[in-house]
Image: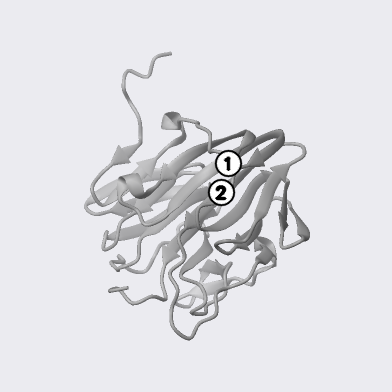
Amino acid sequence: MHNLGQTRSVRKQSHLLHTPDTFIRTQLPGSEKTVVVVHVSPALGAAFTQYTAEFETGGVLGPALGQRFVYVLEGQVEVEADGESHNLCKDGYIYLPEGVQHTCRSTNGARAAVIEKRYVSVAGAKPPEVLVGHEPDVAGQPLKGDEDLLVRGLLPDTFAFDFAVNTMTYQPGTALSMVEIHVMEHGLLMLEGGGVYKLDESWYPVTAGDFIWMAPYCPQWFGALGKTPAKYLIYKDWNRHPLG
């Protein structure tokens, strides 16, 4: 049935809500049997790119432009980097520094969230190396003491990294304790459950599969609704001087 122009997707100056009904798939140079849904890029004003890669059987993702972070959503992804092979299953992830030659492929098909960003160096900090992890193995930390809102930091909290990627898990009815306004921008992919997001002066119902971009200083707040936990994967730039 024709949707008569209806969608939950919204594009504003300070934020974007990108819902699956509006996803358009395209290819990246060097990719084979793999398409991507580009959620945000510098074309929108962001300082990073985030997309979902959809691998067919035997699919290969093209080269990165900058640092690359890969988080497996479904299936398995094999990454070869620095002479080592890493097999990532669901919720597995890998950080690949800028300039590291690597290949990402899937033998049986997969979906993965991919973040790319040019590296911003800082005096006194050695650039990071390849890092591999599995999100469920990372200990959750209560946000501001709230045991019903757990944050899992997937990258080390050091000045070597110029961005962070976390997961945040909300028990039903849990919400951020404040409206946040800050210099960092965000890329957010809803993984499970749903709730309501406040962005600027607008309120949006969100659910698994939705993507949100938040520009610097965009007022933001989230509350989880429903009978199951809400969980999202969230990027932010940090650890660098704002004039840098």
Indicate the quadrant containing the N terminus: top left, top right, bottom left or bottom right: top left
Q: Residues under labels 2 and 1: Cα distance?
A: 6 Å
Mark 1 closeness class: few <14, some 14–19, many ≥20 residues within 10 Å: many
Viewer can see residue 200: yes
Residue 225 visible in the snapshot: no
* Residue that mark 2 sits on: 113
Q: The residue under label 1 is which amino acid type?
A: Ala
Residue closer to the observer: 36 or 231: 36
* x and y percentages locating residue 49 in the rendered image: 44, 50
- Residues 209 and 207: in front is 209
Q: Residue 139 carries which label?
A: none
Looking at the image, which residue is at 47% across and 43% down? Answer: 207
Q: Quadrant of the C terminus?
A: bottom left
Residue under the point 46% across and 34% down: 20
Identify the element where label 1 is drawn. strand
Q: Residue at x 31, y 46 (%)?
A: 44
Q: Are marks 2 and 1 in contact (CB under 8 Å)?
A: yes
Q: Position of residue 172 (x, y in %)?
A: 50, 56
In primary-sequence order, the first of circles 2 and 1 is 1
Q: Which residue lies furthest to the top in this view?
A: 1
Label 1, on which residue? 53
195 displayed left or right of 215: right
Q: How is the image coloured?
A: one colour
> Could you say where residue 6 lies in the image, as x and y percent from the top left?
33, 25
